[in-house]
Amino acid sequence: MAIVGIDLGTTNSLVCAWIDGRMQPIPNALGSFLTPSAVSLDEDGTVLVGASAQERLITHPDRSVAIFKRAMGTDQLFILAGRSFRAEELSSLVLRSLKEDAEATLKEPVEQAVISVPAYFNETQRKATKAAARMAGLVVDRLINEPTAAAIAHGVDTIDSEGKFLVLDLGGGTFDVSILELFEKTLEVHASAGDAKLGGEDFRWRLAQGFLDANGLSWKDLGPQDQAQVMRLAESAKLELTSNRTTLFECRVGGRDLVWPVSREHFESLCRDLVERLRRPVERALSDAKLTPEDIDEVLLVGGATRMPIIRTMAKALLGHEPRTDLDPDLVVGVGAGVQAMLMTCDAAFEDVVMTDVCPWSLGVEVMSARQRGNPDALGDFSPIIERNRTVPVSHSLRVHPVHPMQNAMKIKVYQGESRKVENNILLGSVEMELQPDPDMDANAVDIRFTYDSSGLLEVDATHVRSQRVRTLVIEKCPGSLTPEEIERKLAELAPLKLHPRERQEYRYLLAVAERLYEDSLGETRERLHLLMRSFEVTLESQDLAKCDLAAQAFREALREHRDFDP
Amino acid sequence: MMDWEILGISPTKDLRELKSAYSRALRVNHPDKNPEGFRRLREAYERLLAELSSPREALPSPDVVFAEPDLPEPQSRPEGTQAAPAMAQIDLEPLQEEWQQFWHRSERINPIAWKAFFSRREFWDIRTKRQFGDYLLRYLQAASEAGKLETIPKQAWLVLENTFDWLAREIELGDRFDPEFIDDVMDRIRQAGPQIRRPVTETAHVVPIPVASIDPQPGKPHQHTPVRKRSPRPSNLWNIGILSALLIALVLNSLDRDRTYDLPSQTSSADSRPDSLNGFDPDHPPEDTFVQFPIDSVVPFDAFHEAPRRIEVPRIWMKNWAAGFGGLLRGYCGDPEKDPMECPSQTTKAVRFELAQGALRLDLILGGVKVNGIRTSRDPCESVRLCTVIGTHREVIGLFDTRTVCNLIPARAWEIRNGRLARIAPALAVCPEEPHCEKMPPCRE
């Protein structure tokens, strides 16, 4: 039974495993390492994951969905063909597909995994990720923060090296900064900071907006197909601008062919405020770690979006370092998660590396408000017990007193966040301690102890000092997360949903592409595409694998002639 | 000493050796396999690290009061706020000058100008940014006291947040600056943002959180969240304001007959709406609301034995008093604990203010009865709630709860009755005579 590392990304996902003495990314059925985190329900009831689903975002927007990672840990529902899914369920379908890919390559069942999550994921979102793994039939003992995974990946070959690293991880939807130090086979995370609402998607969106503005269009007026089309072309324009100084943003919207020439400088000016926002977490992480840019030995880049020149320029200006670019920024997190999986199984090669991580947010309780002006229902002040960026596992306690001598119970509400007002933080749970009213406030002092372990579990122990009565709260049930029973029920519900057979995924993908091209084109091209698709479908019905393969090859060649397709 | 033992080495000044020992000890105290051992090791390691590495960068403390010209400087600084030793100083002066010019130019109302000002190269330097951020907060605090924050355009708050990342440091800033002011700034930033819109994700990160309520059950009125004895927030004059203001009000009231001090003649009938300011316009306080008070003078308290008297204190005056009477804090007429004889007679009350641990402690001798009160918060509501006045013999004079008085803040009424601090107000059914009030009336809606 094998254990794998999975990078469950906002836009792309990846699975890695130890093969032939090396940590390697595993290709999917289409032969590529990155599987788009997109899910689509096929008309025959099977589930499409990855590139085919991504193609169908345009042709079948009502049956396809992407970028659901951001909804992890919320109650938001996505409707696919009339059926509603939570983000956990969609993620579990992606995980299931990755699992099948890994099993096909490793030729043995895969039941265990280490999954990476953004450092800034909160308790709820981590729980949701674990629930998704459970629904995909994977046992996940440990989640790993993405930047940590990236640093591990960079350290694989140089585990004896030492130094402080700053990891900039600009993924599709999140931005994370971590400062790590490798010292005598100890990998210590000094600080993590990030912006959970900033990613490569924002840059793409700026480009799409620029295109629409230049052509006097507004996003709201576009149909779903046009919207998806604009966003897809914005992505290719963004990639173009990484290698070229200028590009042409060409798009067919509402039956009109529109062209917008855009230069890299113009693109960067559109994104200036995004770059501003990128700076803040970097500065926060440095400040939390009590370090200056000069202390950093190396800057590592993670996430496809860090290929943008503007990101590298920013890193250089802010940190005075040329960032390191020797590893593929798209693969490092997956590789790191895989290495972590190996560390966990204590493979001899990594036995002696000890890793310590931090809890990237503050955890605390509500205390009597200084602002309850006339409103007894107002929430109070947040008093942190474990401050952000403390090395975990960590345990701290705080002594509190009742507000009122005649108080007969104390409600201890546990929050996570950085605001002084609890209303801006996230409520994780609450526990109550009964009191015997006593005019002497000290008689009812209560010690609240928070213990946070490396798997992200928070235990709250409240002890009544005088009587030594103890109340305990383990943060499990969170808003927007599922109970174990609900997870089991979802698991049963998802079971009948079958992934599209692996050996036929490529055919399905080619058809999805052809459908998209068909919708984009007119006249003769359209006719030709229609004929190609028909004949390919007829061949597929024959069930003759050798014949199908030949037909697929021919089909791909034919599609390649079309300018919008580059498989 | 213990700490070194945990790390398994003899004391050293060598940081590298310490780290190395930590690294070795980690093998035994693995964070996953031996969390208990790891926590012990980590705590020892962090203590030793702090001991060994001298503070690399100590941020200068903000000035205690950024006084407006018409407010007197406080006579003393509360303990612990002496300016920390300056760190590797960066010459901020040119930048500060430019800022002041910017502030006084009319373009201040233009968000674009703000954007331009804060996108200058200097702010790419992290240390400059940190120091200037602190300077700016102090500057804005002064501006806030002069009521000038309103003139900052909404989007400018976003520019500031984008540059200085204040929201993420809210807790820390609240400890270092006037929390009231910090709350104001954070509210303004929150109201201004967020500005980023994206098609696919607009609703994706709204995490529904159940609304938490503080036990609205009428039968159990005393269930509250805990209160934390906070670390000192010495820079906060407001913190010590209300109760001292009340006391001062009492004092001044008592001196009324000498015509030494002109008190605002606020009298209102008992049935006046408790939350009204009695026609007082907080935005335009009369010129004479600021009252000077002699420092280090022995205040005769005999007047407390006069017929019950009432004084109503509008909030704005309290605030002014709070700001103006900073100096009063070190004026007292004898420590009732140590030298009660210093006060001329038994009937003379001694009053002592003590600012310690972020709480204002107040000792009074009223007609030979020693009482004290502790105030830990700056909230007007809380000031009363925490004004749990307990005598030497654990005699409870009155228990004042937030709910009972929260609507009475702007116009509170106090009196001294039989040498005890008591309170009268129309909506208050607090029983000052009964030591234990079993039932507190709910707040007036």
Image: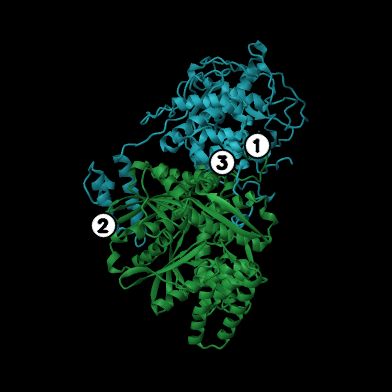
Chain colours: A green, B cyan
- Marks 1, 3: nearer the viewer: 3
Measured along the vertical axis of the image, is residue B156 above or below residue A81? above
Q: Residue furthest left?
A: B10
Measured along the vertical axis of the image, is residue A153 above or below residue B270? below
User: Which amino acid, mark 3?
Assistant: Pro
Q: Earlier in the sequence, mark 2 or mark 3?
A: 2
Locate residue B171 relative to residue A43 in the image: left or right: left
The chain identifier of the residue carrying mark 2 reads A
SS at circle 1: loop
Task: Pinpoint residue B185: horizontal percent, then vertical percent.
Answer: 58, 36
User: Which amino acid, mark 2?
Assistant: Asp
- Marks 2, 3: nearer the viewer: 2
Q: Gap in Å between the C-alphas at discs 2 and 3? A: 61 Å
Foreground of the two, B1 or A309: A309
Locate residue A1 relative to residue A194 in the image: left or right: left
Residue of label 3 = A439
Residue of label 2 = A160
Task: Pinpoint residue B308: horizontal percent, then vertical percent.
Answer: 69, 22
Residue of label 1 = B434
